[in-house]
């Protein structure tokens, strides 16, 4: 719960940082009493600047897969840092990491590395347009692919020309997708798709196999590239691209967040069809070749291959979902839980199923006050460092919060 030190830091930040904070941590996007500043993290837990501990169900908005300060992953990072990190050129870790990714992700024949998800999405966009020299790109309405001018959800500072060649369709709607492809005509460069619908404020949707297959067919018919944006969901759905279980292989996939357990690196993976186009684009960054994050990613990929982290996070997510559903029934709360249980979107909704922002914020606020960091309208994450006891503690907190909300006049 935000305290004295956090308040002092916010006041100082307001003087030297526009708006006091920006991006997904903007004060306006958080529950009213959520802490803004943190001083320690370990395993499944965060400590704020006032010393309060939280079970972190945001996992740093996704990067924390195996737990904060993971000893093996951080040791790999530290060993590489002691030898060479950012230098005039890359380390051998770059080749090793590309080999590791192409050995794990079935559609991938090559890999390129950068730092943020937006970097990877922008590289994918360039590659798609370089493939056949076309301009039109299809994206699902409401989908998030990054914070560059061509895809940011907040239009301030952008111009219409930034999105002049984008066409939007409805996720999971085959007819809408086909209509968008028809509008693109012979100028279709790519279809961008999220592995599942994980937009904010609305229920998450798992992909309809017919939609995914049709996206692949349309790209083949039009000689365009299919991209799956796995930046958020990568390695949280399966140990492969998140559409692999559907039998649909994209030409490109973007990765970030969990691939180095919090160390800064992202990736664009592609097949041989897109290799020549990727070799033509010019993309770079001062820190993109840094070796330490690549070493951390190599260790993270080893743990992904060799541990039961995925099965564990799914089981813990199921435990949370079942417990919250029982609490909601008992307390008369209209609680919506959608998406994969290991990446749940948990909201209080109105009678029409729309996000009740006031009560969702009150629920998240109460959870945070009790020591479980929840978000009112963004999907959350289950981390492999969490325990059944952590889930049970969160459920205990949730029951008390639901009781208070149910008794209020707001519901």
Image (spheres, rainbow, N blue to C red):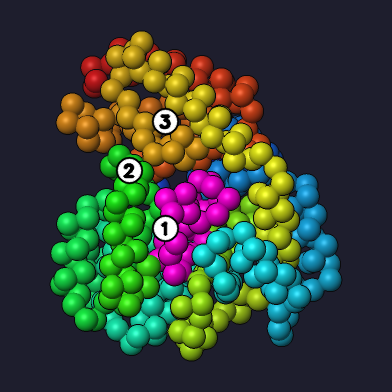
The secondary structure that dominates the magenta segment is loop
Q: Quadrant of the C terminus?
A: top left
- Gap in Å between the C-alphas at discs 3 and 2? 25 Å
Residue at image x 46%, y 19%?
323
The span shown in magenta is 227-255
Residue at image x 46%, y 78%?
274
| Residue 18 belongs to the span the image colors magenta | no
Foreground mark, 2 or 1, reads: 1
**Mark linked to residue 205:** 2
Q: Dot 1: what SS? A: loop
Q: Are marks 2 and 1 in contact (CB under 8 Å)?
A: no
How packed is label 2: few (under 14 Cα within 10 Å), some, or many (20 or more)? some
From the image, tell me which residue sits under label 1: 248
How packed is label 3: few (under 14 Cα within 10 Å), some, or many (20 or more)? many
Residue 198 relative to residue 92: left or right: left
Is residue 223 placed above or below 343 in the rendered structure?
below
**Of the residues under marks 2 and 1, which one precedes in the sequence?**
2
């Amino acid at each position: 719960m935000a305290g004295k030190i956090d308040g002092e830091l916010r006041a100082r930040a307001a003087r030297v940082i526009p708006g006091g904070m920006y991006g997904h941590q903007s004060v306006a996007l958080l529950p009213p009493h959520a802490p803004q500043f943190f001083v320690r993290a370990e395993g499944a837990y965060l400590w704020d600047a006032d010393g309060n501990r939280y079970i972190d169900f945001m996992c740093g908005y996704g990067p924390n897969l195996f737990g904060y300060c993971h000893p093996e992953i951080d040791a790999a990072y530290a060993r590489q840092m002691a030898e060479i990190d950012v230098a005039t050129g890359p380390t051998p870790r770059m080749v090793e990491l590309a080999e590791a990714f192409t050995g794990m992700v079935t559609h991938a024949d090559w890999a390129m590395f950068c730092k943020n998800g937006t970097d990877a999405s922008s590289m994918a966009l360039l590659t798609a347009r370089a493939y056949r020299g076309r301009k039109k790109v299809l994206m699902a309405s409401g989908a998030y692919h990054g914070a560059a001018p061509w895809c940011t959800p907040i239009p301030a500072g952008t111009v219409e020309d930034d999105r002049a060649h984008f066409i939007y369709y409805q996720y999971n709607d085959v007819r809408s997708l086909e209509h968008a492809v028809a509008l693109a005509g012979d100028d279709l460069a790519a279809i961008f798709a999220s592995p599942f619908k994980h937009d904010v404020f609305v229920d998450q949707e798992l992909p309809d196999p017919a939609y995914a297959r049709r996206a692949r067919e349309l790209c083949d018919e039009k000689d365009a590239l299919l991209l799956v944006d796995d930046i958020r969901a990568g390695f949280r759905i399966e140990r492969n691209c998140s559409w692999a279980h559907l039998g649909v292989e994209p030409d490109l996939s973007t990765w970030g967040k969990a691939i180095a357990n919090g160390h800064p690196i992202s990736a664009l993976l592609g097949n041989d069809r897109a290799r020549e186009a990727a070799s033509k684009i010019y993309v770079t960054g001062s820190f993109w070749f840094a070796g330490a994050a690549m070493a951390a990613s190599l260790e993270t990929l080893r743990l992904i291959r060799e541990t039961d982290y995925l099965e564990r996070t799914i089981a813990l997510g199921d435990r949370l979902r079942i417990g919250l559903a029982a609490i909601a029934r008992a307390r008369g709360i209209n609680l919506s839980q959608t998406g994969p249980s290991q990446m749940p979107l948990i909201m209080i909704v109105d009678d029409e199923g729309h996000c009740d922002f006031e009560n969702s914020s009150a629920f998240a606020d109460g959870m945070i006050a009790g020591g479980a960091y929840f978000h009112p309208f963004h999907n959350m994450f289950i981390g492999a460092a969490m325990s059944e006891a952590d889930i049970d503690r969160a459920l205990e907190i949730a029951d008390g919060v639901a009781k208070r909300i149910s008794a209020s006049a707001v519901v």
